[in-house]
Image: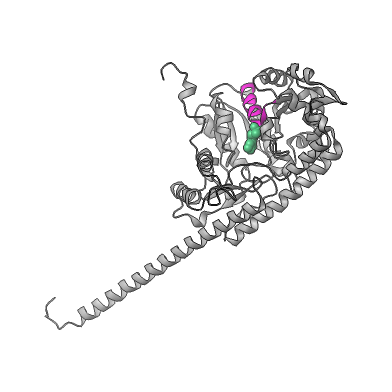
Amino acid sequence: MGILSRKVTCNSHGQDSSYFLGWQEYEKNPYDEVKNPKGIIQMGLAENQLSFDLLESWLAKNPDAAGFKKDGQSIFRELALFQDYHGLPSFKKALVEFMSEIRGNKVTFDTNKIVLTAGATSANETLMFCLAEPGDAFLLPTPYYPGFDRDLKWRTGVEIVPIRCTSTNGFQITETALEDAYQQTQKRNLKVKGVLVTNPSNPLGTTMSRDELNLLIDFISEKNIHLISDEIYSGTVFSSPGFISIMEILKDRNCENTEVWDRVHIVYSLSKDLGLPGFRVGAIYSNDDMVVAAATKMSSFGLVSSQTQYLLSALLSDKKFTKNYISENQKRLKRRHKKLVSGLEKAGISCLKSNAGLFCWVDMRHLLSSNTFEAEMGLWKKIVYDVKLNISPGSSCHCTEPGWFRVCFANMSEDTLKLSMQRLKAFVDSTTSARNQSNHQSVKSSRRRSLNKWVFRLSFDDREPGGER
Ligand SMILES: Cc1ncc(COP(=O)(O)O)c(C=O)c1O
């Protein structure tokens, strides 16, 4: 141990969070319709498997893209040797155009301001290295994506300070919550370097309102700090209100030549919108040339492979394909979301009204034995081990109220989702009837107690004066 670095032995990675523990339990006993029908169903993984057929049919029609060929000629050697950390220009062009398309072409992006990274994980960490020193702090609204403890803190030494959002206003960011987090950080003698939000939110599945986004711009302007907007779920918005990118707000406020323009950075990735987390394609978009230059140099530690860039530049340049993909994928997500919400309703469970993402933020407060995080853990263990559903407890997302859970709906078949809801309903029904029975029994025994008292008092009071006790 003594000859290893502190990084190896510190536990700020967050590996022992229930978010990752649930995955481990799932791995030990994964559900399979045929081979393991009693296994654990994975509902703790924000994967989008709903539109693979669209990607596969494009691949079948465009064999050159995945076959290292251009106009029928092999480009294997060219791709094998390409390692320029600026990325393939054709891919960067296709990617920024795709990002604009997702935002309804209300904003455009410049290929000179984008840095390719191995997923949003790498993009977020790289931004920490560019914007903060070890010991500096970033403010994050709660609940937040559990992976941020690893991505933002672990290797960089940056601290996360929560902006405490609550169910009273649907977990929206308020001026008071922002100011409280800022004051808290100062009390701890940490320097606040910025705010990081995910829009649409993981785990809430909601988009940020124009008012919230304006509030954030006002806040970072006043405090002279950065804003990172992780927009990894921007293409998953399936219902109104639509998605508003932070870039659109900057444009509407004519911020182009102001200081704040350089302090807003976007993170993006193809892991969710295209369902390709295994391809490791992410990006940083920044208006600050220094950040772009430094992040580009840092991207050497996590480049996107040249064959992936080549394949995806062909796919994303096919505008007919992207247009159809974006709308079809959203329709499928909407349908799936509806199935989850109605399945939960049948089990007497409600969730936060949402319009985006690959999950719902589910309210199980009524199933807790007490209003505590211990009770939340107890319920979570029952759901994982007895009901055999891996969902993520709110505490793993740093939620400040016990009883909320993130439940994913796009990484399984419709039949599996149906089964998961049947299991959950059976569990809720049995819990409720057990509770009713014990309530009934306690009412009965308290009645019996008062009856006994009454009988006792009667017999006691009926005693002859001076009689024996
Ligand atoms: C908000 C958020 N940011 C970043 C990531 C990491 O994504 P990637 O697979 O592109 O590294 C995730 C993955 O779940 C996420 O939800």
Q: Is residue 424 visible?
A: yes
Q: Position of residue 64 (x, y in %)?
A: 82, 29
User: Is 281 left, or right, of 454 in this rendering?
Assistant: right
Give the number of callouts. Answer: 0
Q: Position of residue 198 (x, y in %)?
A: 65, 38
Residue that appears at 24% across and 76% down:
456
**Which residue is most to the front?**
35
Question: 115 or 352, which is in the foreground?
Answer: 115
Q: Which residues are magenta?
A: 117-130
Q: Quadrant of the C terminus?
A: bottom left
Q: Residue at x 75, y 43 (%)?
A: 53
Q: Which one is in front, 116 or 455?
A: 116
Majority secondary structure in the magenta region = helix
User: Which residue is painted at 22% across and 80% down in the image?
Assistant: 459
Quarter of the rendered structure image containing ligand 1: top right
Coordinates of residue 211 in the picture (x, y in percent): 71, 43
Q: Which image quadrant for residue 223?
A: top right
Is residue 350 found left or right of 299 in the rendered image? left
Vertical placement of residue 227 versus 200, above or below: above
Q: Is residue 118 magenta?
A: yes
Answer whether residue 226 is magenta in the image.
Answer: no
Residue 452 coordinates in the image, percent (x, y): 28, 75
Residue 239 seen in render: no
Is the residue 241 above or below the residue 213 in the image? Answer: below
Residue occupying the point 58% across, 54% down = 420
**Quadrant in the rendering for residue 144:** top right
